[in-house]
Image (cartoon, rainbow, N blue to C red):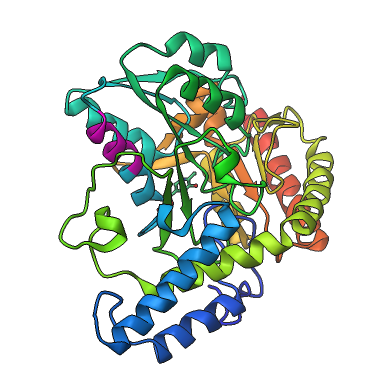
Amino acid sequence: MFAHDGGIAMNTIYLDYAATTPVRAEVIQAMSQTMETVPGNPSSIYTTGRLAKYELTRARDELAEVLGVAGNELIFTSGGTESDNLAIKGLALANQHKGRHIITSQVEHKAVLDSCQRLQEWGFEVTYLPTDKWGLVDPETLQFALRPDTILVSLIWVNNELGSINSITELGKMVQEHGALFHTDAVQALGKLPIVCRDLPVDAMSVSGHKIYGPKGVGALWLRKGTALQPLIEGGSQESNLRGGTENLPGIVGFSTAAQLIEQERETRVADEQVLMTELSHALDDIPGIRLNTHPELRAPNILNISIPHVDGESLFINLDLAGVAVSNGSACTSGAQQPSGVLTAIGVPDDLARATIRISIGRDTTRETLERFTDILKQEVYKLQKKSKAIA
Ligand SMILES: Cc1ncc(COP(=O)(O)O)c(C=O)c1O
């Protein structure tokens, strides 16, 4: 699908950058160079190993610089999913002597929700906060849910399905003042928002490589110095004894390189994406009955989530795919059947409408022309399907 230069197959209108991004050329180069020239195991004590350790430390410190943290506060993982698991389960297990109540929201990524469910099986109590219609947590709702035995709150920063942005500063401050720990999933925030962890009221933060033009299968958990964490993967003293296993050095170098590059370009890119997304929203405005699920202002520059009434969702996505359009839908495949996404249900989108919900997410290769082609195709398909559904009704 992706060409070797990190581009997109000729005829594909790729608008799913929130799902994954093509690895950029500079990252591929840094990774191949590492594979070719750094063969050692960073834990080995002889020169070849020490050279690998040196490269690992360099990549770690460079990523730490981007995030505004110290290198030894980063734990490299296999991606956002593992970082979320490690944060939620690891912080809960290490702090259970203080209480067994956790708070999260109904619109979190599955990695957070499933980890919380596991904690419930292990005897923890979890409160799943409702949100407003954009997927945002109201600070008052959080304040009301905090209890003396609350040890951990985990809230997503930029919602991966909706693109709406939680007020992490206000929410985190409330949690920390209460004496609990605050974790945020920042997988969709990295490269989009300014992030200086040390200045944020946050204790742990998950990030991932493949959403920022880095490789898949590598991510990190930032953990504020001095915060107790129970490791989940044991069997080695790597990552300060918090995540065993020989480090994925080429992946880590690739992730760190991608993070530095995206940070250098962030302000310009965000401005460009904002312009394109505003134009796209306006262009889609006249689709009859269109519903916007992304907050109109508190939103990531690259994500737009819309629901389209009176169209059969399955036919819409088949037709878009046939026309070469790659976008995410509002359903998840559970046991072979398409179920409306839990996030859309939580924000009050009815099932029929959830099936006809599209997440459009743009990235560094998206042009105005691509979005114009997409708009034309979408409008044609919607027109046909809405006509058909009216004829049936
Ligand atoms: C908000 C969020 N959290 C976690 C993840 C999981 O990250 P990874 O694919 O690196 O495991 C994703 C990816 O879809 C995401 O968007």
Give the residues drawn in magenta, as a range: 87-95
Left or right? Give the position of 113 relative to 135: left
Relative to 238, say whether 128 is above or below. above
Which residue is at the front of the view, 71 or 76?
Answer: 71
The answer to whether residue 211 is visible is no
Give the image quarter of residue 370. Answer: bottom right
Magenta residue check for 134 = no
Q: Main secondary structure of the magenta part?
A: helix
Q: Position of residue 322 (x, y in %)?
A: 58, 60
Which residue is at the front of the view, 143 or 208?
Answer: 143
Give the image quarter of residue 15. Answer: bottom right
Q: Position of residue 50 (x, y in %)?
A: 33, 81
Residue visible at 56% across and 47% down?
188
Give the image quarter of residue 387. Answer: top right
Work out which residue is located at the far bottom of the displayed protein and give it.
36
Residue visible at 61% across and 65% down?
260
The answer to whether residue 261 is visible is yes
Give the tally of numbered discs: 0
Location of the C terminus by quadrant is top right
Which residue is at the front of the view, 385 or 267?
Answer: 267
Residue visible at 75% across and 58% down?
269
Q: Position of residue 167 (x, y in %)?
A: 62, 29
Q: Position of residue 391 (x, y in %)?
A: 66, 30
